Image (tube, rainbow, N blue to C red):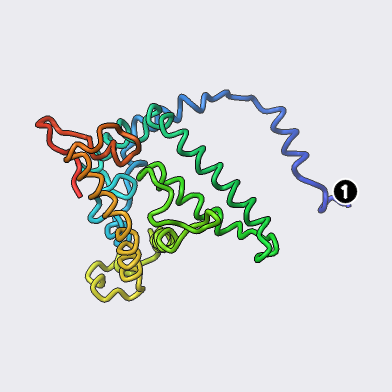
């Protein structure tokens, strides 16, 4: 085949021409840094979408909000209070705990005669991600008691299912994004699905948040152990809470 002109690989000619052509060295890191400095707001901003608006409760979060005052405020909060290297290192032990817990859970599943030693990798991976997030944010692995084998309980399954239901609709094609006056009709069903999923998620998150705020107000807690403690203790100039629920 290589002897036929029409079947001869053309990439050989391209490589030969590339070797003969002059080369220009480009420092990608410097170019990328300059682009971010000049147009950082364009890359950071997010489109206005009904799914994002409902999920973020009116664009109160950072990841889903278009550029603006609220976005700038939350960017400062996340950069200094949540995503800093000091916080990341402080929560390292919590991530290790969940990795060890995952290994123990998989080992028990392999030794379980009822399941013939089979492991649902999808289920284990989903709930490992949920466990890590709950451990870092709330300082707890389970909202309830969990399962005897270390698996997720009913509360955790509903919580994770709600999160994935939100992600399945987030920035999906919605007619209301192009014709906002059709949002009340919810023709594609995204609004109802996201609203119900948020209710399931907040049913477990909100009590934990209110309980933690009460502990700080009553003086029952004095050390910041997780991300929720960091967010609660963020203050404005007048010693007032920076964030609200």
Task: Judge left or right: residue 138 versus residue 74.
Answer: right
Tell me the element at label 1: loop
* Whole-percent x, y for residue 3 in the image: 90, 48
Q: Is residue 181 above or below residue 227?
A: below
* Whole-percent x, y for residue 88 in the image: 42, 32
Alpha-carbon neighbours of circle 1 within 10 Å: few (<14), some, or many (≥20)? few
Q: Is residue 244 above or below residue 155?
A: above
What residue appears at the point 60 percent right and 46 percent down from the top-left corner?
103
Please give the residue where the numbered disc 1 appears in the rendered image.
2
Q: Quadrant of residue 193?
A: bottom left
What residue appears at the point 72 percent right and 38 percent down from the top-left corner?
14
* Whole-percent x, y for residue 70 in the image: 21, 43
Task: Judge left or right: residue 73 versus residue 135.
Answer: left
Q: Is residue 91 above or below residue 174?
A: above
Along the line of sight, the residue nearer the viewer: 228 or 60: 228
Q: Quadrant of residue 196?
A: bottom left
* Whole-percent x, y for residue 6 in the image: 81, 53
């Amino acid at each position: 085949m290589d002897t036929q002109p029409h079947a001869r690989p053309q990439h050989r000619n391209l490589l030969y021409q590339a070797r003969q052509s002059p080369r220009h060295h480009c420092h990608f890191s410097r170019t990328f840094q300059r682009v971010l400095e000049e147009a950082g707001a364009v890359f950071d901003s997010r489109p206005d979408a009904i799914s994002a608006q409902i999920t973020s409760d009116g664009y109160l979060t950072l990841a889903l909000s278009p550029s603006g005052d609220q976005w700038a405020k939350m960017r400062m909060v996340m950069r200094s209070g949540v995503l800093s290297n000091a916080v990341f290192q402080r929560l390292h032990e919590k991530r290790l705990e969940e990795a060890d817990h995952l290994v123990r859970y998989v080992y028990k599943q392999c030794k379980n005669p009822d399941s013939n030693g089979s492991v649902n990798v999808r289920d284990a991976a989903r709930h490992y991600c949920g466990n890590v997030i709950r451990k870092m944010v709330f300082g707890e692995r389970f909202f309830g008691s969990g399962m005897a084998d270390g698996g997720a309980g009913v509360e955790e399954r509903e919580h994770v299912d709600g999160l994935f239901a939100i992600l399945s609709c987030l920035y999906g094609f919605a007619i209301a994004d192009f014709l906002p006056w059709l949002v009340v009709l919810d023709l594609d069903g995204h609004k109802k699905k996201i609203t119900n999923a948020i209710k399931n998620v907040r049913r477990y998150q909100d009590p934990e948040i209110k309980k933690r705020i009460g502990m700080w107000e009553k003086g029952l807690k004095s050390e910041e152990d997780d991300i929720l403690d960091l967010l609660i203790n963020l203050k404005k100039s007048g010693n007032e809470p920076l964030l609200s629920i």
